[in-house]
Amino acid sequence: MAIWTHYYIPQTLDEALSLLCREPQSKAIAGGTDLLLELQQGRHPPVRTLVDLSQIAALQRLEMSQGALWIGASVPLNRVIAWPPVRHFATALCEAISLIGGPQVRNVATLGGNVAHALPAADGAIALLALDAQVLVASPEGQRLQPLLACYAGPGKTALQRAEIIVAFQVPACEKEEASAFRRVMRPQGVAIAIENMGIWLRRKDERIEDIRIAVGPSGPMPFRARQTEQVLRGKPLDEETLAEAEKVLKSEARFRTSPHRATAEYRYHLAGVLLRQTLQTAWERTQLNFAEELGPLSVKG
């Protein structure tokens, strides 16, 4: 039995938006690594029309301009990983998407799909949240730049309307004495879901944490910013006293539950402290590297 009736491959963003508006029960698709599986397994509402976004040039952008990385929503993950600016200036994102699926999946899966799927522990989304990424969204009314969390309505529920398309992600590039890192713990059986993951961005000054962002998943219905823990860490040196206080606050503000597919809540609270220490230490050490000198002016296309 067919799980869709029509399949379109538009060449422009306007054409794609027109199709999504015109066709009933339509759905945008890029890599399809999540959507097609859910359709085959009956875990997604019926879809009559699929609109393939993979040939739209605006969604294939890889460019570094004016201190920010622009990553097209339909760029395959392996292309993003191979792009030097993302490895150097958004390291947490590179580490996160390197863990998504296997090589075959990453050859077709996209960052836009990772966010549009709206899971609270999606690796790409956790890294993007830590990096303070903005999302460029197109609709029939025009384009808008919005915070990442504005794309979420709940676990597996996007806030985007049917005739809205994620075009690209704007990711601020790490500057001197800034760095990021990502860590994930998953089940040893190789099940491709995170027991817990964490992304951290920080700025170091005078041997203290001047500023920091911490994203954790899954802790609640959408990707979670540990803002209370961030506040505790700002202005502090990275020593045992600071780490112990931050770990305590993180365990009090995060909300982990027991999941038969992931782990017990008790174990995940333990992991929160472990991941915080490991990820924070890695980002701290990376602040001493200066990739800007290696790549030159911040205007690079992929």
Image (cartoon, rainbow, N blue to C red):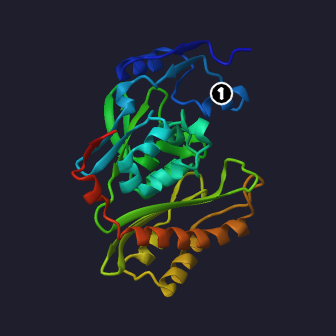
Q: Looking at the picture, does residue 178 appear above or below residue 135?
A: below
Quadrant housing the N terminus: top right
Q: Is residue 152 left or right of residue 58?
A: right
Task: In the displayed orientation, state which residue is furthest to the bottom.
Answer: 241
Q: Looking at the picture, does residue 190 appear above or below residue 225?
A: above
Residue at x 26%, y 52% (from the top left corner): 67
Residue 109 position within the rendered picture, expressed as x and y whole percent measured from the top left: 54, 36
* Quarter location, residue 35: top right
Residue 83 position within the rendered picture, expressed as x and y whole percent measured from the top left: 39, 44
Q: Is residue 290 left or right of residue 261?
A: left
Quadrant housing the C terminus: top left
Under mark 1, the amino acid is Pro
Q: Residues within 10 Å of mark 1 (few under 14, many from 20)?
A: few
Q: Looking at the picture, does residue 21 appear above or below residue 111?
A: above
> Can I make out residue 88 in this image?
yes
Residue 174 position within the rendered picture, expressed as x and y whole percent measured from the top left: 33, 59
Residue where numbered disc 1 is placed: 45
Residue at x 60%, y 33% (from the top left corner): 33
> Can I make out residue 111 in this image?
no
* Quarter location, residue 299: top left
Residue 54 position within the rendered picture, expressed as x and y whole percent measured from the top left: 46, 25
Residue at x 66%, y 50% (from the top left corner): 193
Residue at x 47%, y 31% (from the top left corner): 161
Q: Looking at the picture, does residue 297 appear above or below residue 167?
A: below
Task: In the displayed orientation, state which residue is furthest to the front.
Answer: 294
Q: Is residue 14 left or right of residue 150?
A: left
Circle 1 — which element? Answer: loop
